[in-house]
Image: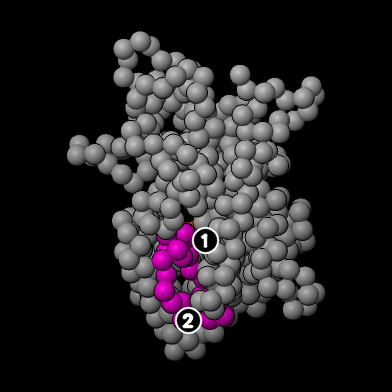
Amino acid sequence: MPEMPEAGGAPRRIDELPTPALLVDVDRLEANLRTMAERCARLGVSLRPHVKTHKCVEIAERQRALGPPEPSTGRDGGAGITVSTPEEARLFADHGFEDITWAFPVIPGRLDEAVAIAERATLRLVIDSPEALAAVAATGHPFHVWLKVDCGYHRAGVDPEGQVALELARALAGSERLIFDGILSHSGHAYGARSRDEAARIAEQERAVMVALAERLRGAGIAVPGVSVGSTPAMAAVRRLDGVTEARPGNYAYYDFTQVTIGSCTPRDCALTVLSTVVSHQPGAGHAVCDAGALALSKDPGPTRDEQGRPTTWGEIYEDYEAGTLHPDLRLASLSQEHGVLSAPAPVGARLRILPNHSCLTAACFDRVHAVSGDRVVGVWTVHRGR
Ligand SMILES: Cc1ncc(COP(=O)(O)O)c(C=O)c1O
């Protein structure tokens, strides 16, 4: 029987926590944050972490503390943070983060919120169309604006060789009110890499595309102050970043099974797990059921496929979390809303630590994350899930 928490007290050990529960191992988290900060310093770029991965003030504060001192105040400040929603921007501004990039194509109907935030923090916006530029200009606010560039991911961003890139950059740089921050890309296609070398090639492709565009714009008389790149697989593998000024990885704080398969990290680096209990197993059945379904893990199929093209796992199970070993034949074979179907029998009552396919989506399934060190619970942090 697990020990019960003291009456009225918060759980102090992992085995006292009700499940499903989200856990972050603070020792691994801090090591991941430090390693990326050191890598960026070595590569000569500022680190502007994407906080959408964790949506936690406590983690963003740790990321900020690793940044170089701000020249004006001498306070630890780094290069600011990256967010994906106006609500994240508002929340982090409320907690004293003064330099925030909303790295999502602006949502015209939410620019009034952006203006309110920009009155108390530097809020940098991202555009990739004349319509978005017109909407930002129409606010009358002297926003900092990045031009989003498609570096090969083909999701959003202007064609780096096209005319629109030149026209938008010229309009931004020539604007009387807006401040042109430079060009920004996200190498999301590095998630398709199946090795660190492949991810390194994509990182170099992103760098080359962005530096070539910066040179083209400068050749046309347009000053390009910043070149901002990044995704976790690219930043875990990248070898050089000449010509780039900042990087915006997010997932590296936690890592996950997808990053393990790419080679960005090993299971010993993964900081985020879902604690779950086996709740059903029938005699003779080849499977069991646990209490972590799609609403605890998200339904990200991950990168691995069987011969029929079906996902091979919806979540891996640690055999030994501290040693970083994954169970060879127990994993999540399918997910319903609250049920997780395990690929092999397991005893009812057993507690599992699940390594999710995609930690950012998993973290956003929970209102709070339990900070743990070894088997101790050392804090409970709010996951600010608002949009
Ligand atoms: C614009 C942008 N920048 C940076 C990131 C961070 O990428 P990752 O989580 O792979 O580090 C993302 C993630 O989706 C993004 O959309």
In the rendered image, the residue lying farthest to the left is 307
Question: Which mark sits nearer the N-terminus, 2 or 1?
Answer: 2
Image: 202 above or below 7: below
Image point (50%, 35%), residue name: 353
Q: As rendered, which of 318 and 338 lies closer to the eye?
A: 318
* Secondary structure state at the residue bearing disc 2: loop
Picture coordinates of residue 379 (x, y %)?
A: 71, 41
Task: Name the amino acid, label 1.
Answer: Pro
Mark identifier at residue 243: 2
Q: Quadrant of the image for the N terminus?
A: top right
Inter-mark Cα distance, 2 to 1: 18 Å
Q: As rendered, which of 270 and 227 lies closer to the eye?
A: 270
Q: Is residue 201 left or right of residue 107?
A: left
Q: Which residues are magenta?
A: 224-243
Picture coordinates of residue 238 (x, y %)?
A: 42, 70
The crowding category of the residue bearing disc 2, from other C-alpha atoms within 10 Å (few below 14, some 14 to 19, many at least 20), is some
Q: Quadrant of the image for the C terminus?
A: top right
Mark identifier at residue 249: 1
What is the quadrant of residue 341 in the picture?
Answer: top left
Q: Is residue 7 left or right of residue 16?
A: right
